[in-house]
Image (spheres, rainbow, N blue to C red):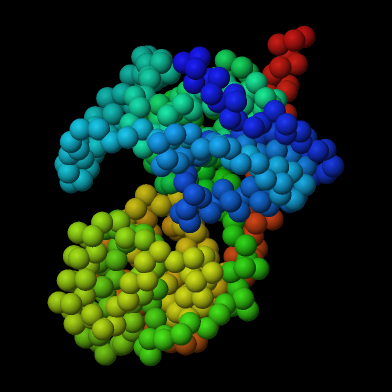
Amino acid sequence: MNGQINALSSNCGLDAVTPVVQGGPLAGRTVLRFAHAFDSDGGTERYLDDLDRILLERNAMTIIRLHLTREALRVQPEVASIGQGKLIRIRLPVAEESGARSSTETSVVRLQIKQKLRDLVLYNPLVWRTIGSKWAASFQPRQKPGEAVGAGIAFAEIMRAHHIDMAMLHFFGGADAEEIVTAARENHIPFTVLNHYSNDRFLHLAMRKHAMLADGVAGVNGLQVPRYLERRFVKLSDGIDTKFFSRAEARTIPDMPAEPIVLLPARVIREKGQLDLVRAAASLRDLGVKCSIVFAGRVGTQEFLNELRNEASRAGLTDSTRFLGAVSVEALRDWYAASSLVAFPTYHHEGLPRVIIESQAMGTPVVAYATGGVPDAIVTGTTGLLVPTGDITGLTKRLCELLSSKELRLSIAARGRQAAEQNFSLDALAERHEAFYLRIIANAGRVADRKNA
């Protein structure tokens, strides 16, 4: 263990970083983030990149981001000057897969059974008040594949180099997060948790433990907040660069389909609903409504891609279905502008999908399943259209309405753009985070003063 700590000390590159104190409400502060994020264009990664950039432009502060790498060894930290402050990125290797894993279907069934038993037994009010809450507080999560290795060691090294004013966990409930929570509490550093998924995740036992211990609890949407958090929960929402995501910035796409485009920008996995869109498009064709489907996103498995292609072939949609694969943010913006609609028939535990906010900013109407936090991003009939999850007939109907009415598309597009500018700009996101951080830091200071009195 000591060898690992010494290795971290020699490679960390943190002791030369001294934040300037020029301006902004968070001037001179140091905030540490822990996230299950990689160097990619995933939703959480883009959230963090945008958030840190706007905060550092507005504040002379330091942000230290602990996140993940698929490299076998720890990667050399990066220190970058952004705006008035500094961003330090420290990547941690992840625990490898080990042993055989059960099928997805078996895992889902087992999880559902465990959750039912948890809710009926452990979360029974009488059991929870007498023994459940005490047992949960002592619960120790076991490390799982994909979690960070050495999170606690890295956190200890950072504490020696910096005075950390607050830690924010963008992933919690895992053994790696437990290491950070333990170290933060032992060293009297306030910590907060921010859930990027649907708020039923707060009912998972380990996540509930960390939420109970946290100095602040937040999420990206305000729906389905568990009762035990109602008085503490803060909605921080999401934000995007509305100047970047605008039709004025979009470029023309060569070799565009001749038919109206329905875009689904998401990773190509079963939970994102690509199969539902293919089936809805087949029904539209039967109604005489033509469209081209464009899937933009990296492929999860070749098996599901083959299944999706076969479904399109059986429906006679091969020539009107296009797979772009992973695309740059610039290219995705161009496809938003070129598309008549965005479809998002997701089954996933969504927090607040960025693709919906980006679509609104681009003036491209969205039809989406009302899954998880999706309804928090759409005023149905005004800034988009919502459909019950799994209702392919309803999805078909809504797509048909929009494809058949340019007036309706333009109306929703205009109000969607207005909503994005008012509610989801980066400055609005920064203001929410600044207020949240300042309250947590101030409360921690008052507690420390009382203890020292």
Q: Is residue 311 visible?
A: yes
In the image shown, does 82 or 57 lie closer to the viewer? 82
Q: Can you give x and y, in whole percent of width and height, for residue 83 in the image?
A: 75, 51
Q: Can you give x and y, in whole percent of width and height, for residue 55 in the image?
A: 69, 47
- Residue 240, relative to residue 73: is it above or below? below
In the image: residue 367, left or right of residue 65: left
The C terminus, quarter of image: top right
Image quadrant where residue 192 sits: top right
In the image: residue 408, left or right of residue 283: right
- Tally the marks: 0
Residue in the picture at 44% in, 34% down: 73
- Residue 316, relative to residue 20: is it above or below? below
Q: Is residue 217 visible?
A: no
Residue in the picture at 54% in, 69% down: 330
Find the residue positioned furthest to the right: 22
Residue in the picture at 38% in, 90% down: 258
In the image shown, does 59 or 360 lie closer to the viewer? 59
In the image: residue 245, left or right of residue 369: right
Q: Can you give x and y, in whole percent of width and height, for residue 247 in the image?
A: 59, 77
Image quadrant where residue 183 sits: top right
In the image shown, does 169 or 16 lie closer to the viewer? 16
Image quadrant where residue 201 sits: top left
Q: Can you give x and y, in whole percent of width and height, for residue 121 in the image?
A: 27, 25
Residue in the picture at 46% in, 40% down: 68
